[in-house]
Amino acid sequence: MDATVDKDTLKKALTMQPPKVECVCERGLAKAELLGNGICRYYQKGTFIRAFYSEGKTADGQVIRTKDASLEGYSCEEGTDKLGAYHRMTARYCHGALRLHQMVTAYDGGELTVQVKLHDTRGKTATRFLAPVVTPYPTWDERTLFLSLDQKMLVVPYDNDMWSRYESAVPACGRESYDVTALYDERTQEGFVLGALDFSVWKNAIRWLHNDARSIQAYCGAAGTGTHDVCPHGLVCGEWVESSRFVMFWCDSIRDGMEHYGDLYAALVPPRPWRKGSVPFGWNSYSAVGQGLQLSHWEQAGEFIRTALPNFCGEPGETFINLDGALGLDEQKIRQIIEELHKKGQKAGWYAIPCNWFAALGDFPARGTNVKMKDLFLRDDTGALLPAIDGSQPLDVTHPEWEKMARATIRHLIDLGVDYIKIDFLSHGSVEGAHYSPEFTGRMALNYAYSVLSEEIDRAGREIFVSLSIAPLFPTFLGHSRRCCCDAFGHNEDVRYVLNALNFAWWTNHRLYTFNDPDHVSLCHSVVDGRGVTTENEARARYYSAAISGTVMMLSDNYGPVGDDAIIRQARSRAEKIANCAAINEVAQLGQAFRPVYLCDGTTPFYTLCHEGRRYAAVFNFENATKTLSFAAADGGLPEHGIARNLETGAEMTYSEQVCVELAPWDAVILEILEEKI
């Protein structure tokens, strides 16, 4: 076969003219050019950032990509929505029987949102996959970050179950972040934020393409091990099927960028309002006594915290004393204890698991119904039970009997007089399967469950704090707080684990949720984790990791009267020494998450907060050896010269350019940064 190419053909191929600009969408600092080849070029402040195209696929495998389809036409409009004034360009594509509309919207601040909708002319449109943003291989005239082998991807887990973590990861084919990500340079901290804005229908993800780790795909229809799914994403059907909106923008500081993403989301869905405003302080039974809980533990914890820890509170004298995972207790006695707590100015909390149940207890009656719990287990298309997730079965939250059960459960807790409800294992409600309402995807089902629960809680006629425990990051409207991590106890590795979430998700505080919950704080001994008594330094670091998380402050040790007397005495002594420090608790009472000084591999030991004219720094020693740790004050947004005062001891030191501390093994310090005395 003759593989030669004549010179004219080769010259034509090498000198091909760039595609024609068909339409320009521009507003403020953002601009998008629609090219004749189906590619869009995104500019911010006049600088070319990234090229992208869109695609969709029907349930029977028919695919349409803007870069391969025929452009039928386009239109532009101006308007205003919750994100601000915009200029929107809608490009209309066809390919065979499929139609794809690509809506590109530019905003004043330089942000660009992209959404697509798919139509199948053969009949009802049915799809499990829409990708509003797919980037081709980066070119030399785009931001050089996208060609770098050292660029990092912020990997956001779908939820916080089974000790999932945030990661700063290098490009790898197929690597995936759920709902939002950032691509950034660790050295300069500049980068590109790309994230979904809608969470009512689709599970969203951003991934490096399986055949090219320099191209990314932001898509709707994620379902796999990361979302605890064994079934494919539920079908979304209609005459036209819309994707979620994805927003993209470039930022000089990725920390500013993630906060800006959170602000954009909050403009659409504000955090559930906590009108009381104060940070919840209190006690949680789980780590302290686990399934060995007796109601006397609950009473004693309330009395100890009220009398021995006067500085440990959100509002003067107010603490929440909470039962967790407690089954089979005397409810008449519980009602009496709640009344006694209220008389003493304290609050009471309990626990609910409305979206999961245990296979071994399937014959239990579902509260408020005539069915058993096993009748609500979610199944696949063959009728088989779905695999257990973290030891329990997902429930079909679209079943009408589930709604009766969920409403009855919340009404029962409200009737008992609780002021705080911890709702656990909510991710089970988002699992894909053969729902009673077949039109529901997993995320639609979870939104429905949240709506039912929220409606019942709102009917209480009084403010009840709603704490989401194991739950996806999105949706957010049910909870005042969400656990930023899975179960955390009191050892050094727990400190690092909690700080992993602060390091990479501090920006959710007051944007997605009013408070980030760093889980209960064991200062002495957990009966659950099986790792023995913590050191005092570990306990201090664990308390500080909670205080700077922006935050829910729940102690969880056994203060008696039943248990190992030596551990009870030590737990009380530890709490009095660490949890009663007024200066540290004042930081926690701010409810403000500290910012990581650096975003990089692993977890940084350095965090700062600048709030209402006051400045703080927190430093952690993750090593079992005395260490000197330092960071550039300017990197943490602090004055280059000043005084650092240890909030626990009151000791002061001056610093110049570098904030430097020496810490004992596994210890930590919180400093207030003051102006240098002249």
Image (tube, rainbow, N blue to C red):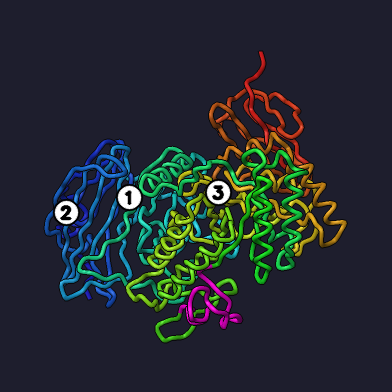
Residue at (44%, 61%) from the top-left corner?
450
Q: Single out the mark in the foreground, 3 or 2.
A: 3
Q: Quadrant of the N terminus?
A: bottom left
Q: Are marks 2 and 1 in contact (CB under 8 Å)?
A: no
Q: Secondary structure beneath disc 3?
A: strand
Residue 673 is situated, as x and y percent measured from the top left of the image, at: 64, 28
Residue 139 is situated, as x and y percent measured from the top left of the image, at: 32, 50
Circle number at residue 139: 1
Residue 294 is situated, as x and y percent measured from the top left of the image, at: 74, 64
Is 171 covered by the magenta stretch?
A: no
Under mark 3, the amino acid is Asn
The tag earlier along the polypeptide, 2 or 1, is 2
**Residue projecting furthest to the left:** 72
Q: Secondary structure beneath disc 1?
A: loop
* Residue linked to disc 2: 36
The tag earlier along the polypeptide, 1 or 3, is 1
Q: Is residue 596 visible?
A: no
* Residue linked to disc 3: 516
Q: Is residue 346 visible?
A: yes
Label 2 crowd (10 A; few <14 / some 14-19 / many >=20): some
Residue at (30%, 49%) from the top-left corner?
113
Under mark 1, the amino acid is Thr
Chain part drawn in magenta: 354-378
The quarter of the picture where residue 580 lies is: top right
